[in-house]
Image (cartoon, grey):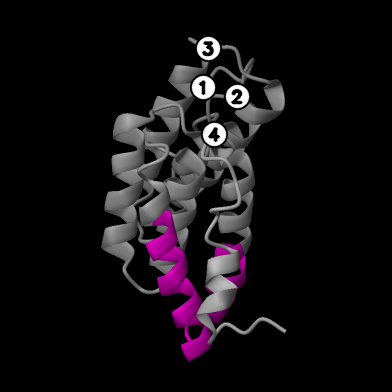
Amino acid sequence: MPSLANDSYYSLLAYSYFSPLNTSIVDYLIVSEINTAIPMADMDLGRELALKTLSRIDGQALLKSPNCIQDTAKARLVWALGEKDEAIDGLMGVLSVAPDCEQARLVISEALVKLGRSDEAVGILNEGINRIRFKEVLESESRVLFIALEEALRAAGREDEEGGRPGGGGRH
């Protein structure tokens, strides 16, 4: 049975068995690992898993950069480890090189709201909504940004703004 304490477990997940061109499998595995590590981040086992996962993400960065999925997941894990400023900086870095990364926009806006910086979250979400106009996006993908914007506006005490919903008369 593989053990987290055993490095052979990590060599199995070293992704050397996957083609570097198939990043979606690697992304899925890394995000799954991060989703396991986040709730355990305050325990030794969780911290060990988190640090090994962060190291693996850094190694994967050479294969595909920017990697919206892995970089956003990394920021979530860094946040869970208590490095909130580093997580925010990482997400801002993702948006600077991959401005269409909606996942990073959602995570950073949620983090900013938690830090009481709701107006910044509103600005970041509005930028994302403005970008939707210039690309084809499924309605379900853009809807998530509108919902997050409404929550950020509410947190900023700006409920009177419509949140930019299509047909709502608010800012886009």
Q: Is residue 112 in sight in this rendering?
A: no
How crowded pointer 4 is (Cα within 10 Å; few <14, some 14-19, many 20+) is rated as few
User: In whole angstroms, how far apart are the C-alphas of marks 2 and 4?
Assistant: 37 Å
User: In whole angstroms, how far apart are the C-alphas of marks 1 and 3?
Assistant: 20 Å
Tell us which disc is closer to us: 2 or 4. 4
Residue at which label 3 appears: 135
User: In whole angstroms, how far apart are the C-alphas of marks 3 and 2?
Assistant: 17 Å
| Chain-order first, disc 2 or disc 4 | 4
> Mark 3: which amino acid?
Lys
Secondary structure at badge 4 equals: loop
Residue at which label 1 appears: 170
Circles 2 and 4, Cβ within 8 Å, touching? The answer is no
Circle on res. 21: 4
User: In whole angstroms, how far apart are the C-alphas of marks 1 and 4?
Assistant: 41 Å
> Mark 2: which amino acid?
Arg
Circles 1 and 3, Cβ within 8 Å, touching? The answer is no
